[in-house]
C-alpha cells in the first residue's frame, strides 16, 4: 500500500518540481499564485477574485508562496501529499488495520485517475481532511466537527458532512460548539487582515453565475448547443474563468438552482433524521453507517443540484466511500465502482478533451452526459440506502460492529476465546470491551 502511495505521489511531486524549476504552475495554481503575489487584493487582479473562496483557503496559498512564485506548485503538491499521507494513515491505522488497506488502495486509485484535479485545486486539500474527520466519525463529535469546520472555511462543500454529523450524533451541542470556535477564529483572522467585509463574499460571488458547462442540470442546454437548437451557445465567463451554456430558459434555471440545492440538502438531512429514529424502532440505528451514507447523499446532492459543475467537484465524493469501504467493503462496492467510472469519464472530459467539448463535439457531450447520469444514479443509490437504514437496518451490515485496531490488539492479548466472543458481538472482559467501545460510543 505504502509503495503504491509513494509511487503515485512521487510522480506528481516530480512533475510539480520540473514545472517549478521552469517557473511555471499548473491549472488553478496559476491563479492561486497570482492572488498570493498581490496579497489577495481583488482590485489588483483580472478575472476571479481570491474571495470566491472562504478565507482559510488563502492560508495554504500563502504557505505555498512563502519562497516566492517559482516553487509555488511544488510546495502546493507537497502539502496535498502530506495531507493524503495523514488520511491514508488514519484510514488504515498506519497499516495496522489490514482490512482497511483495500479501501486505501481504492482512494489512491481514485486520486490517480483524477490526476491534477486532486493535486492542483483547493479541493485536493479538503478531501483528505474530510476523510480524516470521517475516520474519527461519531465517536468524537467535537473533534470531527472541528476538523470539518476548518475544511468548510477552506471550501464550502464539507458543510454537507457537518450537516450529516449534526443529524446523527447524540451530542449535537459539541458539533455546534466546535463550529462556533472555528468561526470565531476565522472572524479574528479576517479582522487582522482588514477583510471582515469580504468574509462572506464566497457565498455572494456565486449568485450571478450562469449554468456551467459540466453541471448536471446543464445537460439539456449542452445538447441544445451541440445540435444548434434554440440559439443555445457555449461561452467563457472570463470574470470567473468558467465555461457556461446559455439558451432558452437557462437564466431561469440558473436562478432556480440555489433554492433547489438548499431544498435537496434539507430533504436529505430530514431523511437521515427519519432513518435514525425509525431505525431505532426497527431493530437499532447504526449511527456510523448513517453518517457515511448520509454524507455521501448530501455531498452528491451538493454536486448534482449545483449550477457550478467544475470537474474537481468529483474529489468531494471519495472520502465517505473510502471510509465506508474500510468499514464494510461489500456494502460500499456499488458506489466505489460507480466513482471509478465517474473518475475515468471526468478525466476524459478534463483535461484530455475539454477543448473538443467546449466546441460542441457530440462524442464528448455524450461522455459528459454519461458522467452526469452516473452522478444522478449515485445520488439515488445513497438516498435508497438511507431509506433501507430506516425500514430494515439489519439489511445492511452494521458499521459500528467493526472492531478498532486497539480492540483487535486487546483481544489478541486476552486469548482466542475472548477474540471469538468479540467477533460474535459479546463483551467477555473489560480489556476487549474497552477497545470496542471506543468505536461505538455514540451508537
Image (cartoon, rainbow, N blue to C red):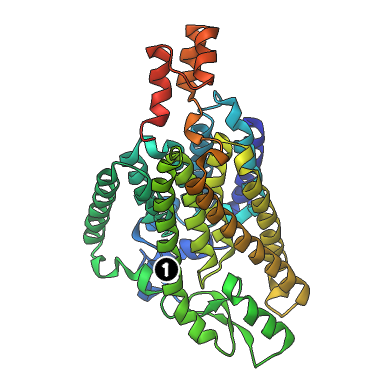
Where is mark 1, residue-wise? Answer: 263
Q: Position of residue 405 (x, y in %)?
A: 49, 22
Q: Position of residue 390 (x, y in %)?
A: 47, 48
Residue 127, visible in the rendered structure? no
Q: Nearer the viewer, residue 78 or 229?
A: 229
Q: Position of residue 81 (x, y in %)?
A: 54, 42
Residue shown at the point (40%, 62%) measured from the top left: 266
Q: Nearer the viewer, residue 443 or 203?
A: 443
Residue shown at the point (43%, 62%) measured from the top left: 267
Q: Quadrant of the N terminus?
A: top right
- Quarter-wise, where is residue 4 in the image? top right
Q: Position of residue 422 (x, y in %)?
A: 49, 18
Residue occupying the far bottom of the picture: 231
- Quarter-wise, where is residue 205 in the image? bottom left
Residue shown at the point (56%, 36%) measured from the top left: 397
Q: Quadrant of the C terminus?
A: top left
Secondary structure under badge 1?
A: helix
Residue 213, visible in the rendered structure? yes
In the figure, 50 relative to 212: above or below?
A: above
Q: Nearer the viewer, residue 13 or 315?
A: 315
442 on left or right of 232? left
Amino acid at each position: 500500500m505504502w509503495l503504491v502511495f509513494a509511487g503515485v505521489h512521487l510522480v506528481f511531486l516530480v512533475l510539480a518540481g520540473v514545472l517549478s524549476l521552469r517557473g511555471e504552475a499548473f491549472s488553478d495554481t496559476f491563479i492561486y499564485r497570482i492572488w498570493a503575489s498581490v496579497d489577495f487584493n481583488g482590485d489588483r487582479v483580472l478575472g476571479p477574485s481570491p474571495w470566491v473562496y472562504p478565507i482559510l483557503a488563502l492560508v495554504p496559498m500563502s504557505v505555498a508562496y512563502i519562497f516566492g512564485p517559482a516553487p509555488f506548485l511544488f510546495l502546493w503538491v507537497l502539502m496535498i501529499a502530506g495531507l493524503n499521507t495523514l488520511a491514508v494513515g488514519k484510514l488504515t491505522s498506519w497499516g495496522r488495520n489490514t482490512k482497511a488497506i483495500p479501501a486505501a488502495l481504492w482512494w489512491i486509485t481514485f486520486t490517480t485517475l483524477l490526476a491534477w484535479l486532486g493535486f492542483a485545486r483547493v479541493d485536493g486539500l479538503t478531501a483528505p481532511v474530510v476523510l480524516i474527520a470521517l475516520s474519527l466519525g461519531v465517536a468524537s463529535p467535537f473533534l470531527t466537527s472541528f476538523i470539518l469546520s476548518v475544511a468548510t472555511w477552506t471550501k464550502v462543500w464539507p458543510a454537507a458532512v457537518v450537516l450529516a454529523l449534526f443529524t446523527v450524533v447524540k451530542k449535537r451541542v459539541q458539533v455546534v460548539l466546535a463550529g462556533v470556535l472555528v468561526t470565531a477564529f476565522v472572524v479574528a483572522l479576517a479582522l487582522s487582515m482588514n477583510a471582515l467585509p469580504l468574509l462572506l463574499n464566497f457565498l455572494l460571488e456565486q449568485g450571478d453565475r450562469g449554468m456551467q458547462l459540466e453541471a448536471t442540470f446543464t445537460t439539456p442546454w449542452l445538447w441544445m448547443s451541440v445540435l444548434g437548437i434554440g440559439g443555445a451557445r457555449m461561452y467563457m465567463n472570463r470574470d470567473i474563468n468558467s465555461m457556461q451554456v446559455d439558451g432558452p430558459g437557462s437564466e431561469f434555471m440558473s436562478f432556480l438552482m440555489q433554492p433547489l440545492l438548499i431544498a435537496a440538502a434539507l430533504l436529505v438531512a430530514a431523511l437521515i433524521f427519519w432513518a435514525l429514529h425509525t431505525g431505532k424502532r426497527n431493530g437499532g440505528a447504526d449511527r456510523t453507517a448513517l453518517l457515511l451514507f448520509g454524507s455521501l447523499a448530501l455531498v452528491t446532492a451538493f454536486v448534482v443540484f449545483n449550477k457550478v459543475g467544475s470537474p474537481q467537484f468529483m474529489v468531494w465524493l471519495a472520502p465517505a466511500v473510502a471510509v465506508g469501504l474500510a468499514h464494510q467493503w461489500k456494502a460500499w462496492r456499488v458506489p466505489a465502482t460507480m466513482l471509478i467510472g465517474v473518475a475515468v469519464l471526468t478525466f476524459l472530459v478534463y483535461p484530455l478533451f475539454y477543448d473538443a467539448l467546449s466546441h460542441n463535439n457530440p462524442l464528448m457531450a455524450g461522455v459528459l452526459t454519461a458522467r452526469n447520469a452516473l452522478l444522478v444514479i449515485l445520488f439515488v443509490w445513497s438516498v435508497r440506502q438511507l431509506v433501507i437504514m430506516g425500514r430494515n437496518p439489519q439489511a445492511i451490515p452494521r458499521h459500528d460492529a467493526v472492531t478498532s485496531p486497539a480492540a483487535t490488539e486487546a483481544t489478541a492479548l486476552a486469548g482466542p476465546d475472548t477474540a471469538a466472543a468479540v467477533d460474535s458481538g459479546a463483551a467477555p472482559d473489560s480489556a476487549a470491551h474497552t477497545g470496542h467501545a471506543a468505536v461505538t460510543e455514540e451508537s
